[in-house]
Image (cartoon, grey):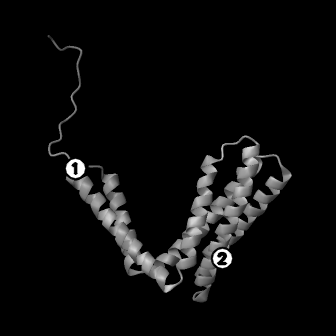
């Protein structure tokens, strides 16, 4: 039984409970976390991805994408904290549109990277996650989205309970101390 796995299970259970009993607050937290992730992604694009290919169109596109990511991320973090109400819904839709546009520009960037002989497989995941998160964000503000968040909360809670139970059930009954082999043993 590893205590870190138990802690992860407890953390997942807390997240599941938050999603189940406070779905609108969970959506707010998700928007802020996505905003922070968008800022980090923008900085990463400007610092690392932009210099991968020497094509000026590629570098210009990645620069625009990086600065846009930072701006959208700052808005996603600050606006909902400063202004309540409808701003949450607007920010959710802005993030969703941004993620779709980001996925489109990433596809262009991937074609340029492939031409330059750079492995594009790790960057492909970003396209899929961007589209997936965008779809989730488009349905979150609706009543249907709240129901989905609650269902996901139940599923995460059940998975966490199963994970904790499995870790607890598989603990060793007897723990033996480690023995050192000494060089003075006689045969």
Tell me what residue is drawn at x 83 percent, y 49 percent: 55
Q: Earlier in the sequence, mark 2 or mark 1?
A: 2
In the picture of the structure, the residue carrying the numbered disc 1 is 170
Instruction: Please identify the quarter of the rendering in which residue 172 is found.
Output: top left
Residue 45 drawn at (x, y percent): 70, 55
Question: Is residue 82 in view?
Answer: no
Left or right of residue 10, residue 27 in this image? right
Q: Residue furthest bottom?
A: 85
Residue 15 pos. (x, y %): 40, 69
Find numbered disc 2 in the image and state the secondary structure of the residue it sits on: helix
Q: Quadrant of residue 163?
A: bottom left
Q: Which residue sits at x=52%, y=72%?
A: 30
Query: Element under label 1?
Result: loop
Image quadrant of residue 151? bottom left
Label 2 neighbour load within 10 Å: few <14, some 14-19, many 20+: some
Of residues 123 and 47, the one nearer the viewer is: 123
- Which residue occupies 31% across, 67% down? 158
- The Cα–Cα distance between marks 2 and 1, rounded to whole angstroms, is 46 Å
The quadrant of the rendering that contains the C terminus is top left
Q: Which residue is mark 2?
A: 94
Question: Looking at the image, can residue 118 be seen?
Answer: yes
């Amino acid at each position: 039984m590893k205590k870190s796995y138990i802690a992860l299970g407890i953390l997942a259970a807390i997240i599941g409970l938050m999603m189940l009993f406070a779905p609108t607050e969970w959506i707010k937290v998700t928007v802020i976390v996505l905003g922070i992730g968008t800022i980090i992604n923008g900085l990463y694009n400007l610092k690392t991805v932009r210099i991968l290919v020497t094509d000026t169109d590629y570098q210009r596109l990645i620069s625009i994408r990086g600065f846009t990511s930072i701006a959208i991320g700052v808005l996603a973090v600050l606006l909902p904290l400063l202004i309540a109400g409808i701003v949450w819904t607007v920010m959710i839709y802005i993030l969703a549109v941004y993620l779709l546009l980001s996925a489109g520009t990433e596809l262009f960037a991937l074609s340029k990277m492939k031409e330059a002989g750079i492995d594009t497989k790790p960057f492909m995941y970003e396209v899929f996650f961007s589209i997936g998160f965008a779809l989730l964000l488009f349905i979150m503000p609706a009543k249907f989205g709240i129901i989905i968040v609650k269902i996901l909360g139940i599923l995460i809670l059940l998975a966490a309970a199963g994970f904790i139970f499995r870790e607890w059930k598989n603990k060793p009954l007897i723990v033996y101390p480690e023995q050192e082999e000494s060089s003075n043993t006689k045969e």
